[in-house]
Image (cartoon, helix red, strand yellow):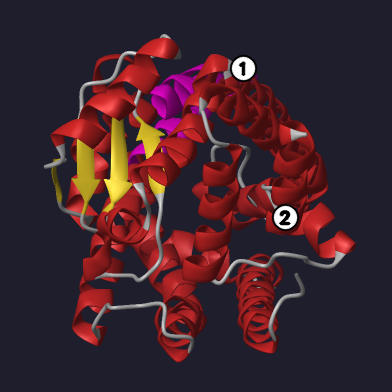
């Protein structure tokens, strides 16, 4: 089935806004670096306090005001205007502002914690900081994955135990067959913000739980909900979380090593006083962006491979292939998903196979 003109416009506009946002962020980093503004911010921070950790905090506050402020218009267009323009959002403007403030507060706190540690390590171990930071950051990512469903998600969404005993038992039985222990099945109040539907197996170890959006529960039959969850359980069965940690770990080590080498090479050219000079944060960010862009197609290709494995598991785990196909059709309709994106768009940007390919795979698998 061809994508409608409305779906094409939605995704084309979204991509334009994302690329524009990326270009604005990139321009801000380049201006801070090449115009010497980052050195001026460092001077202001050091006037505020001679203590390194306080000076870093002041610099981060100024850096955040500039980067967040310049990106705010495009964030609004992408996160609020576009979703309302295509009838996908239930969020009021006040609600969007509230969520943005929560995100800035949470993201700012985590960023401050990470960057304070990074520069403290640079000051203490100027040649080997990148090894320590890689290990600590990977551990921190794992900790966040564990705490996400109990500390982070509830900041933005409401959850309650699913009030459907038969569906709950059906999903718990499915998880037992996948040898996946979960703490329960929860209804996710997504309709307060969006008309889109979603489901997930989130958390690690003793925080792992099944979450189902109320929009999904309202539109999907029980066997379709089971098909969606079977896909999520497929990721667990194939140890995709572990693979993700390994890939994230390798990328983190590579990224910090490249930052270490780049700062050592370019710091004198920009007037930085060694690697531990926090004025080099824009250069650090640019190295991270460059590495992300280089790795993006490969990371997405691997992700699509994992999604195909999870689809195959789901088709083996459920009794009705038709339920899987109908769930894909409904997700495409509710979420305005692209059924048939341009091959290059899918290759570069998509972490999942297209809906058309997933349905075709299910039809072949059934046969």
Whether the magenta-drawn stretch holds residue 115 is answered as yes
Q: Quadrant of the C terminus?
A: top right
Q: Position of residue 70 (x, y in %)?
A: 49, 80
**Up/down of 356 relative to 172, above or below:** below
Whether the magenta-drawn stretch holds residue 127 is answered as yes
**Up/down of 94 relative to 226, above or below:** below
Nearest the eye: 77 or 286: 77
Nearest the eye: 265 or 361: 361
Residue at 14 percent across and 33 percent down: it is: 165
Residue at 42 percent across and 23 percent down: it is: 142
Residue extending furthest right?
344
Specify few, some or many for label 1: CA neighbours under 10 Å numbering under 14, 14-19, or 20 or more.
few
Choose top left, top right, bottom left or bottom right for residue 29: bottom right
Secondary structure at badge 1 equals loop
Q: Horizontal placement of 339 versus 128: left or right?
A: right
Q: Horizontal placement of 323 versus 262: left or right?
A: left
Q: Please identify the dominant SS of the magenta region.
A: helix
Q: Position of residue 170 (x, y in %)?
A: 30, 27
Residue 249: tell me if it is visible: yes
Q: Name the residue under label 1.
A: 128
Q: Position of residue 322 (x, y in %)?
A: 58, 45
Residue extending furthest top?
179
Q: Residue 354 carries which label?
A: 2
Could you give the CA–CA distance between mark 1 and mark 2, rounded to whole angstroms? Answer: 43 Å
Specify few, some or many for label 2: CA neighbours under 10 Å numbering under 14, 14-19, or 20 or more.
many
Q: Give the range drawn in magenta.
A: 113-142
**Up/down of 36 relative to 261, above or below:** below
Nearest the eye: 335 or 93: 335
Q: Looking at the image, tell me whether mark 1 or mark 2 is earlier in sequence order.
A: 1
Residue at 48 percent across and 38 percent down: it is: 227
């Amino acid at each position: 089935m061809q994508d409608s003109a409305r779906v094409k416009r939605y995704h084309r506009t979204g991509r334009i806004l994302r690329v524009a946002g990326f270009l604005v962020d990139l321009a801000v980093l380049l201006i801070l670096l090449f115009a010497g503004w980052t050195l001026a911010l460092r001077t202001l921070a050091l006037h505020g306090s001679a203590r390194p950790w306080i000076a870093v905090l002041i610099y981060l506050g100024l850096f955040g005001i500039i980067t967040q402020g310049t990106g705010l218009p495009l964030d609004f267009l992408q996160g609020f205007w576009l979703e309302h323009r295509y009838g996908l959002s239930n969020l009021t403007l006040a609600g969007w502002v509230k969520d943005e403030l929560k995100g800035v507060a949470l993201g700012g706190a985590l960023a401050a914690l990470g960057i304070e540690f990074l520069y403290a390590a640079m000051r203490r171990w100027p040649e080997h900081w990148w090894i320590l930071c890689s290990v600590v950051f990977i551990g921190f990512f794992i900790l966040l994955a564990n705490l996400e469903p109990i500390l982070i998600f509830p900041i933005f969404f409401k959850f309650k135990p699913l009030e459907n005993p038969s569906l709950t038992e059906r999903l718990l039985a499915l998880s037992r067959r996948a040898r996946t222990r979960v703490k329960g099945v929860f209804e996710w109040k997504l309709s307060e913000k969006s008309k889109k539907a979603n489901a997930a197996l989130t958390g690690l170890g003793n925080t792992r739980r099944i979450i189902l959006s109320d929009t999904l529960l309202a539109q999907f039959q029980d066997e379709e909900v089971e098909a969606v969850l079977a896909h999520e359980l497929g990721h667990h069965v194939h140890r995709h979380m572990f693979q993700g940690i390994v890939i994230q770990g390798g990328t983190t080590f590579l990224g910090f090593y490249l930052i270490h080498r780049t700062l050592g090479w370019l710091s004198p050219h920009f007037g930085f006083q060694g690697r531990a000079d926090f004025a080099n944060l824009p250069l650090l960010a640019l190295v991270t962006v460059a590495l992300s862009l280089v790795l993006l197609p490969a990371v997405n290709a691997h992700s699509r491979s994992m999604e195909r494995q999870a689809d195959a598991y789901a088709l083996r785990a459920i009794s009705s292939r038709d339920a899987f196909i109908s769930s894909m059709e409904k997700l495409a309709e509710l979420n305005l998903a692209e059924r048939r994106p341009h091959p290059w768009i899918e290759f570069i940007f998509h972490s999942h196979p297209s809906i058309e390919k997933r349905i075709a795979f299910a039809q072949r698998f059934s046969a």
